[in-house]
Image: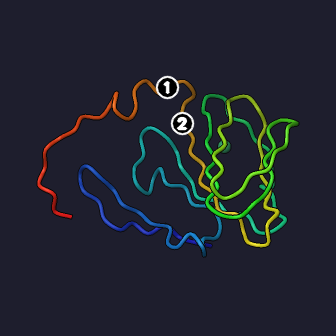
């Protein structure tokens, strides 16, 4: 089981790490680790042949699954499709979902959960280019 380490934080940021993705195991939620206020995010892994042990549905939140490694299948209600490293799957509220790893290597994925239809502005409709000394 991997652990989330709090790396550093300030009044405007928090940095946590689950370590190397290639050796990630288990499930780790990030909301409390970094103080998320707009979404929940988790890292998950499935060993070869394994699926999440239950289907579930959300009442208010959509979910986005980002597959970081491995291959498998994703099911939404009764529809099934293939997923692999690089896949991004959005799932609406009010439907059942599950995923299964079918590759020889474990599947590692991120799941982001946020209130459906809550996004009002993003990227350049929300961002402002600012001036700052670059200390990187
Ligand atoms: Zn969920």
Q: Position of residue 7 (x, y in %)?
A: 35, 68
Say if 57 sits above or below 24 in the image.
Answer: above
Which residue does the numbered mark 2 point to in the structure image? 114
| In the image: residue 102, left or right of residue 35 | right
C-alpha separation, residue under disc 1 versus residue under disc 2: 8 Å
- Could you say whether the residue bearing mark 2 is in a helix, strand or loop? strand
Q: Quadrant of the N terminus?
A: bottom right
Residue extending furthest toward the right: 78
| In the image: residue 112, left or right of residue 49 | left
Which residue does the numbered mark 1 point to in the structure image? 118
Nearest the camera: 105 or 3? 105
Quadrant position of residue 125: top left
Neighbor class of circle 1 (other Cα within 10 Å; few <14, some 14-19, many 20+) is few
Determine the residue positioned at 44% across, 38% down: 38
| In the image: residue 100, left or right of residue 35 | right
Determine the residue positioned at 61% across, 60% down: 68
Ligand 1, seen in the image, is in the quarter at: top right
């Amino acid at each position: 089981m991997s652990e989330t380490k709090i790396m550093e934080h300030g009044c405007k940021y928090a940095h946590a790490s689950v370590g190397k993705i290639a050796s990630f195991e288990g499930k780790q939620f990030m909301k409390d680790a970094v103080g998320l206020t707009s979404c929940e995010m988790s890292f998950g892994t499935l060993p070869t042949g394994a699926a999440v042990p239950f289907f579930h549905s959300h009442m208010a939140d959509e979910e986005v699954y980002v597959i970081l490694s491995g291959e498998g299948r994703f099911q939404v209600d009764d529809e099934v499709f293939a997923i692999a490293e690089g896949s991004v799957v959005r799932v609406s509220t009010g439907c059942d979902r599950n995923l299964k790893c079918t590759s020889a290597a474990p599947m590692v994925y991120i799941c982001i959960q946020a209130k459906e239809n809550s996004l009002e502005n993003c990227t350049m409709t929300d961002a402002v280019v600012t001036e700052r000394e670059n200390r990187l």
